[in-house]
């Protein structure tokens, strides 16, 4: 799996090696052995709000958006873009009493889980995603 990191913001430091390790941990913990390419872009609220409006019809910033861009005829491949807002990480860290770095890694895991078929449309599904993310982050020794 090729993993590309694009840091297009300067508010929260991004450790590319640790981000790659986080993506690999999600894939291995879910038993995924697909090949392909995942691009993770770390942006500001202005950029993610623009994407959220353009692709999801929501005129507000969000923490993470995951786009599965694989061809339907290629279920053995994973091609995706994950866009993460550093501004949301800073804001949410204050709300949830975590750190902006913790929030960034949480968004990496959350975006990956969406790509792998998880969703958070109801309370039960949100709890499943939260539990999976917590286990993965704990396995990487990423703490609040």
Image (cartoon, grey):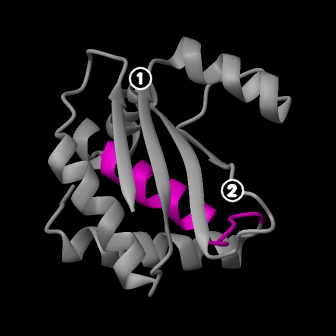
Q: Nearer the viewer, mark 1 or mark 2?
A: 2
What is the CA distance from the residue labelled 1 to the residue labelled 2? Answer: 28 Å
Specify the quadrant of the image occupied by residue 11: top left
Q: Position of residue 89 (x, y in %)?
A: 38, 34
Residue at the (16%, 48%) spot, across then down: 17
Residue 46, compared with residue 52, is above or below; it is: above
Report whether residue 74 is seen.
Answer: yes
Q: Which residues are magenta?
A: 103-121
Residue 55 on the magenta segment: no
Residue at the (33%, 38%) spot, across then down: 93
Residue at the (44%, 87%) spot, across then down: 31
Q: Residues within 10 Å of mark 2 (few under 14, many from 20)?
A: some
Q: Residue furthest right?
A: 57
Location of the N terminus (image quadrant):
bottom left
Specify the quadrant of the image occupied by residue 120: bottom right
Q: Position of residue 45 (x, y in %)?
A: 52, 18
- Element at badge 2? loop
Report whether residue 99 is seen.
Answer: no
**Residue 70 numbered tag:** 2
- Element at badge 1? helix
Residue 141, compared with residue 95, is above or below; it is: below
The answer to which of marks 1 and 2 sits earlier in the sequence is 2
Q: Is residue 141 left or right of residue 75?
A: left
* Residue labelled with disc 1: 87
- Which secondary structure type mostly characterizes the magenta part of the structure? helix
Q: Position of residue 74 (x, y in %)?
A: 71, 69
Q: Residue furthest front?
A: 73
Residue at the (46%, 42%) spot, across then down: 39
Viewer-side residue, 27 vs 10: 27
Q: Is residue 69 left or right of residue 31?
A: right
Location of the C terminus (image quadrant):
bottom left
């Amino acid at each position: 799996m090729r993993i590309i990191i694009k840091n297009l913001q300067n508010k929260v430091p991004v450790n590319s090696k640790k981000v790659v390790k986080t993506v690999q941990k999600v894939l291995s913990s879910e038993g995924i052995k697909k090949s392909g390419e995942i691009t993770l872009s770390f942006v500001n609220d202005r950029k993610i709000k623009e994407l959220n409006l353009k692709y999801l019809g929501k005129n507000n910033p969000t923490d993470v958006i995951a786009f599965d861009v694989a061809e339907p005829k290629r279920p053995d491949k994973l091609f995706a873009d994950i866009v993460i807002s550093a501004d949301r990480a800073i804001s949410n860290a204050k709300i949830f009493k975590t750190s902006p770095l913790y929030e960034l890694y949480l968004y990496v895991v959350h975006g990956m889980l969406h790509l792998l078929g998880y969703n958070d449309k109801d309370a039960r599904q949100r709890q499943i995603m939260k539990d999976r993310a917590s286990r993965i982050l704990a396995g990487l020794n990423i703490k609040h």
